[in-house]
Image (cartoon, helix red, strand yellow):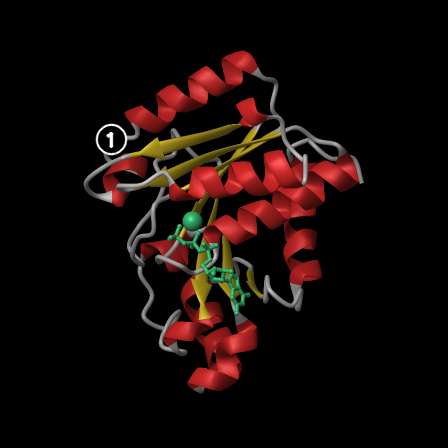
Amino acid sequence: MMKIGVLGPVGSGKTTLIEFLTEYFVRKFAISVGIITNDVVSNHDAVRVYEELVVTKKVLPKENVVGLVTGGCPHTAIREDPSMNLRALERLTRRVRLDVIFIESGGDNVMSTFSGLLADYTIFVLDTAAGDKYPGKGGLGISESDLLVVNKVDLAPYVGADLEKMKRDAEKVRKGKPTVFVSLKTGEGVESLINVLKEELSIEGILRI
Ligand SMILES: Nc1nc2c(ncn2[C@@H]2O[C@H](COP(=O)(O)OP(=O)(O)OP(=O)(O)O)[C@@H](O)[C@H]2O)c(=O)[nH]1
Ligand SMILES: [Mg+2]
């Protein structure tokens, strides 16, 4: 089983990314996927994932989606004290056999990282709507995540975000680790996102491609 931690600023597209990848990999490769969402004070994301993937699209059984309301600081729940997430993971994997589990952090800042106990692989999701200053600002989440996804490239022209600058800055701070530029709304760039993950899942022995 591969535990994929998804983190990044509030509203960058973490839940949208998890929904997209889950639907793609379940439909295309019939793998078994679970999702744990972390929200600070609401259960908004779990309800949304449930409605979208369980009720409407029938991609997942309902027991594969767990929503946690962590309270307090979102970083703590995935890094310093991941016990709530570890318990949820344990309960979930006791009930169902999973190939992949996505764990979404509550929206957080560029310094956020996952405890190694909780995630084998991490995806940091940024978006262009905040302009092109990220990823040049660096921060552990941006520089150390296994995959950096720069989402909402469809919005870049409206805020004058220079994608080439973002590419150069990402290359500089990430020292060879992959970065993909996508729009989860229009579908632009999603093949490169899928290709990176296909490769990771085949390294883990989850996909045979
Ligand atoms: N224009 C545009 N909007 C997008 C794109 N991806 C996601 N969105 C929208 O951005 C909003 C936030 O997306 P979410 O997936 O909820 O973001 P999140 O990172 O999970 O947010 P939190 O969990 O609240 O931190 C939603 O209204 C999405 O429909 C994109 O590529 N382009
Ligand atoms: Mg979310």
Residue name at image x 65 percent, y 68 percent: 186
Which one is in front, 143 or 31? 31
Residue name at image x 60 percent, y 34 percent: 54
| Residue 67 placement (x, y as % from top left) | 41, 32
Where residue 22 sits, quadrant-wise, is top right
Q: How many marks?
A: 1
Residue 79 visible in image: yes
Above or below 205: residue 125: below
Task: Name the side, left or right, on which 48 lies relative to 29.
Answer: left
Above or below 148: residue 152: below
Q: Residue type at mark 1?
A: Asp
Which residue has dot 1 on it?
Answer: 81
Cβ of mark 1 under 8 A from ligand 1: no
Where residue 100 sits, quadrant-wise, is top right
Residue name at image x 55 percent, y 52 percent: 17
**Quarter of the picture holding the C terminus:** top right
Which one is in front, 101 or 173? 101
Q: Residues within 10 Å of mark 1 (few under 14, many from 20)?
A: few
Residue name at image x 58 percent, y 17 percent: 96
